[in-house]
Amino acid sequence: MTLIDGKATAEEYKSVIRQEVAALTARGLRAPHLAVMLIGNNGASETYVANKMKTCRDAGFEATLIRYENTVSEREVLHKINEINHNTEIDGLIVQSPFPNHISPQKINEAIHPAKDVDGFHPVNAGRLQQNKPCYIAATPKGIMQLIERYKIDTQGKHCVIVGRSNIVGMPMSILMSRNAKPGNCTVTVCHSKTVNLAQYTLQADILIAAIGVPEMITASMVKEGAVVIDVGITRVPDTSARNGFRLKGDVKFDEVAPRCSFITPVPGGVGPMTIIGLLQNTLLAAKHAIYN
């Protein structure tokens, strides 16, 4: 079994990004600038955003945090997004989810200009991905593909089973894994919370991607010997023995599944660090006007 080290891989990619940023500024151009909007005081979101901001600055980016209370109106958020869309000094914008109930994720995602949508959630970017055209690929799927490539995992003709159908991970992963590319060329099955007899499908997987958000849902009896397992889930589970009162759990019951695998990602330290790298890469593309001129 080989442990896929997302943290170490992310450091390698960050070094390359840092060099590209240094080359830009050496030519008298400004560093890429990412704006991150955080609404409310969700503990997990606070952690994710802090990691994103730190990684941005480590890579030489400029990073701006825009904070709102839970009570902010949807109209005010949309107004701010429109303002950033027209700010030529900001290359990319993300709005950290989850949002308060009175704010529509669809409206937020559609309000961000496709050229600044470095999360890859706008329908234009999602549509261009479907048609295999240049676009911003959602950061988590992009990071997963780079891990697969980095570890030289063979995908040609393999059966990839994805558990989870979100627009953030599951659906874009299904496109990336099935397209005629390397990595790619898989036969893909997408399962979800309403799939009957889930194990019937996961046991067929040469490559299993768990992205359903249910801690330790995937057990050893659901994974065939030698499978590649990519665990996208990350949930805070209460644990009184932990210093901060919780532990992070993935969608895969790691200790019992890992011995059956050829490759597996841990939680934390697997997919998470590469998600931030995907975000930085998209922002760098935006700064260079590489997707939208």
Image (cartoon, rainbow, N blue to C red):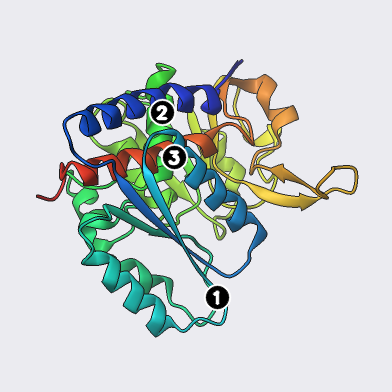
Residue 252 shows in the view: yes
User: Where 78 sits versus 25, above or below?
Assistant: below
Q: Quadrant of residue 202?
A: top right
State yes or no: discs 1 and 2 in contact (Cβ < 8 Å): no
Q: Secondary structure at mark 1?
A: loop
Q: Which residue lies most toward the left here?
A: 293
> Label 1 belongs to which residue?
100
Q: Quadrant of residue 69?
A: bottom right
Q: Where in the figure is residue 47, as x and y percent of width and height?
A: 61, 50
Q: Nearer the viewer, mark 1 or mark 2?
A: 2
The type of residue carrying mark 1 is Pro
Residue at image coords 59%, 27%:
224
Residue 114's disc is: none
Q: Nearer the viewer, mark 3 or mark 2?
A: 3
Q: CA distance from mark 1 to mark 3?
A: 28 Å
Residue at image coords 58%, 57%:
45
Picture quarter with the N terminus: top right
Q: Of 143 and 13, which appears nearest the observer?
A: 13
The type of residue carrying mark 3 is Arg
State yes or no: discs 3 and 2 in contact (Cβ < 8 Å): no
Q: CA distance from mark 1 to mark 2?
A: 32 Å
Residue 14's disc is: 2
Residue 153 shows in the view: no
Q: Of 266 and 269, which appears nearest the observer?
A: 269
Q: Secondary structure at mark 2?
A: helix
Q: Of 4 and 155, which appears nearest the observer?
A: 4
Q: Few, some or many C-alpha atoms within 10 Å of disc 2 (few <14, some 14-19, many ≥20)?
A: many
140 to the left or right of 27: right
> Label 3 belongs to which residue?
57
Q: Of 177 and 290, which appears nearest the observer?
A: 290
Q: Quadrant of residue 144?
A: top left
Q: CA distance from mark 3 to mark 2?
A: 11 Å
